[in-house]
Image: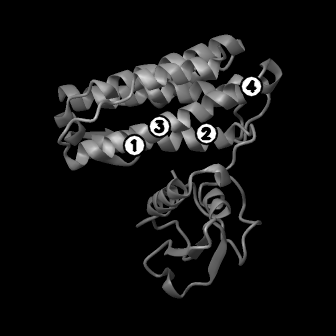
Amino acid sequence: MSFADAAQVRSAQTSVPAPREQSAAVQDAVAGLAEVERATRALYEVVGGLDLPSLRGPSLLPGWSRAHVVTHLARNADALVNLLTWAKTGVEHPMYPSTADRDADIAEGAGRLPQLLRADLDAACQRFAAFARDLPPSAWEAEVAHPRSGPFLAHRVPWLRLREVWFHLVDLDGGVGFDDLPPELLEHFLDDAVGQFADRPDVPDARVEAVFPDGRQRSWGLTADSATSPAVSGAAADVLGWLTGRHSGARLNGTAPTLPRWL
């Protein structure tokens, strides 16, 4: 049985049971966790096919090898367990002790052999799935905090994990791109990416137009004054890649301004 096959069996065994009556928070968390399972299976397929030279090779993130990305995804799963622990107990558990500790853990893990990298990733993903499965329904409505964006409710934690898995799956440069995202997630991530620029003084006025695979179109303003700004347009996947700093915007129509870091 391959790494991906074994992980898929374990994923099916750790699904969050759906109670007869669910609050809106629980419904949102359960929906997010189902998407995380699907994304994690895709992640395992890519990571399972990476040999040592591939893992040591560069990812799409400057300065990081693919092994750095895989290790980061493992440590992010553990960091989100910290947030869920906070939600469950009411005792503050930050995602990481410090930025320096986070970076040191990633650097250390990136030197591991492929089988150890995959085992670490799988174990961390399973810890997250198991902890989420057993979380009391009321805990999904508890307030926790992200080190950069501040307080939010715990039912959004699965969606944070989903963003990490999909975006860094793209960063692994292993044959998966934003155009492989399910259409509903592509739109969700575009809404999220635009939202990250809201109320920031360093964001240029720009109007963004995206065309989805089904031909539907949507537009967003990056600032309150963007309604009359020249439009930057293109395929939804390419717009998402530009907004999140994965490419310069050369694939888009119109003059794409230089954007600050989105996160």
The three-letter amino acid code for the residue at tag 4 is Gly
Mark number displayed over residue 168: 2
Residue at x 46%, y 28% (from the top left corner): 77
Query: What is the spatial separation of the Cα atoms under label 2 and label 1, in whole angstroms?
Result: 17 Å
Q: Looking at numbered disc 3 in the image, what kind of residue is underneath it? A: Val
Alpha-carbon distance for marks 2 and 4?
16 Å
Label 1, label 3: how many angstroms apart (C-alpha)?
6 Å
Specify which label sits upstream in the sequence, 2 or 4. 4
Near mark 3 (Cα within 10 A), the count class, few <14, some 14-19 or many ≥20, is many
Amino acid residing under circle 2: His
The label shown at residue 125 is none
Tell me the quarter of the picture where residue 70 sits: top right
Q: Are marks 4 and 3 in contact (CB under 8 Å)?
A: no
Distance Cα–Cα, label 4 vs label 3: 20 Å
**Nearest-to-viewer mark from 2 and 1:** 1
Residue ID for mark 3: 36
Q: Is residue 222 left or right of residue 85?
A: right
Name the residue carrying label 1.
Answer: 32
Do callouts 1 and 3 mark residues in contact (Cβ within 8 Å)?
yes
Q: Percent x, y for residue 147?
A: 39, 40
Q: Residue at x 60, y 60 (%)?
A: 243
- For the question of whether residue 33 can be seen, the reply is yes
Disc 3 secondary structure class: helix
